[in-house]
Amino acid sequence: MDKWLYRASLALVTLGLLVSIYMTIYKITDNKNMCLGSGGCSDVIHSRYSEVNGLAVPVIGAIGFTALLLALFFETRNPFFEKNGTLIVFGMSLTGFLFVVWLVFVELVLIKSLCPFCITTQITMTLVFILSVIRLIRQPQF
């Protein structure tokens, strides 16, 4: 296991989780002071696209980043995850990346507004996906 890639993934997933929690709090409290920049957060978080089947997108992000964090945590502590963790993280990050592609389309084309916190989590998930591809390619074959 490449420790640098593992630690970078861990740091990015933690950042993504923290920002997702922040945006969840913003969505729940509707505290306008939490929206930084151009005010795009408010446009995005109050749009009809801010929920999927009644679940807020920031909550989906928090769940996804938590799952990734757990997978990375157990990768060094559990025999099943030691063998399969890299592939599991790749699959989860691929799913997250595909969701990010959809969200970027929604923000740019449908809502026509950008949220700096959303962009942060989107970039974070994209980087986690890229690192997971590199980790998968470098993984020794059993």
Image (cartoon, rainbow, N blue to C red):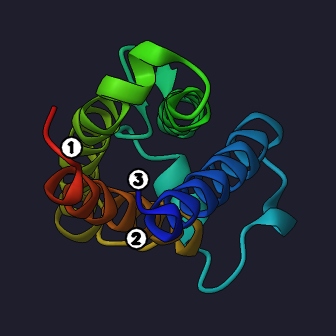
The residue at which mark 2 appears reads as 123
Task: Kindly identify which numbered label has been placed on residue 60.
Answer: none
Q: Of callouts 1 and 3, which one flags the residue occurring earlier in the amino acid sequence?
A: 3
Q: Is residue 141 above or below residue 31?
A: above
Q: Nearer the viewer, mark 1 or mark 3?
A: 3
* Residue at image coords 21%, 43%: 94
Q: Residue furthest bottom?
A: 37
How packed mark 1 is, by other alpha carbons closer than 10 Å (few <14, some 14-19, many 20 or more), is some
Name the residue type under label 3. Met
Of residues 12 and 140, the one drawn nearer to the viewer in this rendering = 140
The residue at which mark 1 appears reads as 94
* Residue at image coords 55%, 75%: 116
How packed mark 3 is, by other alpha carbons closer than 10 Å (few <14, some 14-19, many 20 or more), is some
Q: Of callouts 2 and 1, which one flags the residue occurring earlier in the amino acid sequence?
A: 1
Of residues 80 and 51, the one drawn nearer to the viewer in this rendering = 80
Q: Nearer the viewer, mark 2 or mark 1?
A: 1
Of residues 60 and 140, the one drawn nearer to the viewer in this rendering = 140
Q: Is residue 104 left or right of residue 70?
A: left
Q: Are marks 1 and 3 in contact (CB under 8 Å)?
A: no
Q: CA distance from mark 2 to mark 1?
A: 13 Å
The residue at which mark 3 appears reads as 1
Q: Nearer the viewer, mark 2 or mark 3?
A: 3
* Residue at image coords 31%, 42%: 96
Q: CA distance from mark 2 to mark 3?
A: 24 Å
At mark 3, the secondary structure is loop
